[in-house]
Image (cartoon, rainbow, N blue to C red):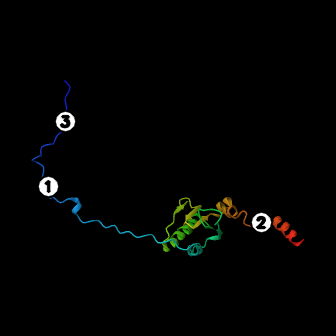
Amino acid sequence: MVPTHSRPGPTAPSYNSPVSTDHRSPLTTAAQVIKTRLPNPPPPVEVLLQHVRNAVEELKAKDVVEIDVRGKTSVTDHLVIASGTSTRHVKSIADEVVKHAKKLDCMPLGVEGEREAEWVLVDLGDVVVHVMLPRVREFYALERLWTVGDQPPEEHEELTAGRVGE
């Protein structure tokens, strides 16, 4: 014999269950107010660069180089490259850069490489900071990569100078 199922209908109230006497609708409770504020505009690039300079100087970063990459990439306007003497030093410099940026109410878009701390990148939008161990910095040679073509080769200068004097 196959059991037959009837269509479900209204169930009878249970006399053992408590009956609610609260007839208020959830819509009549006090409204939740969400406080929001518009984000502050980013600081001017020169102000941000100065805070980055201060941060790397405070923690005695080595061989600090700034490269203006406007016109070469749309990702950022300036690169700051610095070296630390150990992985702990590299991480500390990057942390100090983040701390100085937060003082400006500028939250980093990203921080990469903190765990290994051989090369830590701090993306502040208009300024990207690379803090590296010297051997890593030498291997990747970011300064050379981003400054290729900025200055004419020496023999091109000599040829040009010779033609001007003729």
As rendered, which of 86 and 66 lies closer to the eye?
A: 66
- Asked which quadrant contains residue 86, the reply is bottom right
Mark 3, Cα crowd under 10 Å, few <14 / some 14-19 / many 20+, is: few
Residue picked out by circle 3: 7
Q: Earlier in the sequence, mark 3 or mark 1?
A: 3
Tell me the kind of residue under disc 2.
Pro
Residue picked out by circle 2: 152
Residue picked out by circle 1: 20
Tell me the kind of residue under disc 1.
Ser
Cα separation between marks 3 and 1: 28 Å
Cα separation between marks 2 and 3: 87 Å
> Residue at the left extreme?
15
> Residue at the top extreme?
1
Q: Earlier in the sequence, mark 1 or mark 2?
A: 1
Instruction: Give the secondary structure at mark 3.
Output: loop
User: How far across and how far down the image is residue 53, in percent?
Assistant: 59, 74
Instruction: Give the secondary structure at mark 1.
Output: loop
Side of 146 where 160 appears, left or right: right
Q: Quadrant of the C terminus?
A: bottom right
Instruction: Give the residue at x 40% y 70%.
Output: 37
Side of 115 where 68 appears, left or right: right
- Asked which quadrant contains residue 148, the reply is bottom right
Front of the two marks 3 and 1: 3
- Asked which quadrant contains residue 89, the reply is bottom right
User: How far across and how far down the image is residue 137, in percent?
Assistant: 65, 62
Instruction: Give the vertical position of 11 relative to 57 (above or below).
Output: above
Instruction: Give the residue at x 53% y 59%.
Output: 115
